[in-house]
Image (cartoon, rainbow, N blue to C red):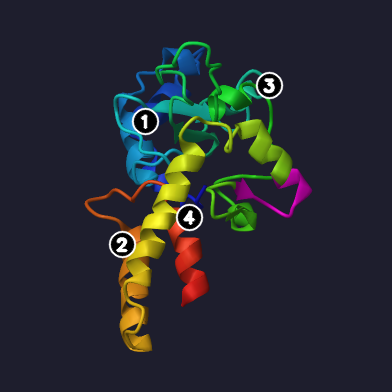
Amino acid sequence: MRKIDKQASNEPQSLKNHRSTPNTNFDGLDKSDLQDALLREQFFLCAYCMCRINKKNINIEHYKPKSKYNNLELIYSNLFGVCDGGENIPLTSGKKRKLHCDKKKANQELLKLNPLTNSVDLLYFTQDGTVKSSDSDISTDIKLLGLNEGIFLKKHRANLLKSLQSEYSRLRGKSLAERNNFLRSKKKFYSQGFEGKLPEYCQVALQWIEKKL
C-alpha cells in the first residue's frame, strides 16, 4: 500500500451532479468518469495491494462501508479504485480461492490502515514478500485485507525485490557514486513511473532503496 494524494479537484463532475440529485444512490451512478478519475489519481494501482488495475478490472471500494455509512456512499474521499481481489484467477483442482483487498474485507471496517494517511508508513516488506507492521491494529488490518493471502501477491513482491537486488549486486566493485546513481534512478522510476502509471508493488522497491541510500 502507498499513500494516495486524493484531491477534491479530481472528483468528476458526473459524481457531483449525481450526488446533488434527490433520491439517488451509488448503484444508480454511471461510474465511467469515476473509474477514470480513480485510475489516474492512483497511477493505475490498486489502493490496497498495489497490483495493476485498469478500466476493465477496476472495482470501486467504499473505505467506510456503504452498508453502514450510506451518507458516505457518494463522497469522493471515501472511494478508492481496487482490484478484483483474486475473484477471477483460475484455480487448479482442489485449491481453495483466497480473496484479498475489498473482496476479503467486505463490509468490515479497517482499524487504522488508510491509503490517505501516514499509516501506510508503518508497513514494511520482508524478503519473501510478506507485508508486516509492528503496530497491532495495522497487523489486524493486513489480515482483514488478506494482503499476504492472495495466490500471487507475496510471490510478485518477492520477485520484484529479488530482481532489484540482483541488479544492484552487479554493481559490486563499482564506486559509491555509481551505486548511488543507480539507486536514485530506480527511486525516480518507482516513485514517478511512466506515462501516468507507477510500477506494480512500487512501495516494496522504494522501501528497499531508501534503506540503501
Residue drawn at (31%, 32%) of the image = 54
Residue 61, position as x, y percentages in the image: 51, 28
Residue type for callout 1: Leu
Which circle's residue, 2 or 4, is located before the other in the chain? 2
- Which is closer to the viewer, label 2 or label 4? 4
Residue 149 highlighted magenta (yes or no): no
Whole-angstrom CA distance, mark 3 to mark 2, is 40 Å
Mark 1 or mark 3: name the one nearer the start of the chain.
1
Q: Mark 3 points at which residue?
A: 68
Residue 49 visible to an observer of this rendering: no
Give coordinates of residue 62: x percent, y percent.
55, 28
Please tell me whether mark 3 or mark 4 is closer to you in this view.
4
First to last magenta residue range = 131-138
> Height in image: 61 above or below 210?
above
Secondary element at image label 3: loop
Counting residues from the start of the chain, the first of labels 3 and 2 encountered is 3
Per the model, the C-alpha gap separating discs 1 and 3 is 22 Å
Residue at the image position 34 percent from the left and 88 percent from the top: 175
Eye-nearest disc, 2 or 1: 2
- Of labels 4 and 1, earlier in sequence is 1
Residue with the mark numbered 2:
189
Image marks 2 and 4: residues in contact by CB distance under 8 Å = no
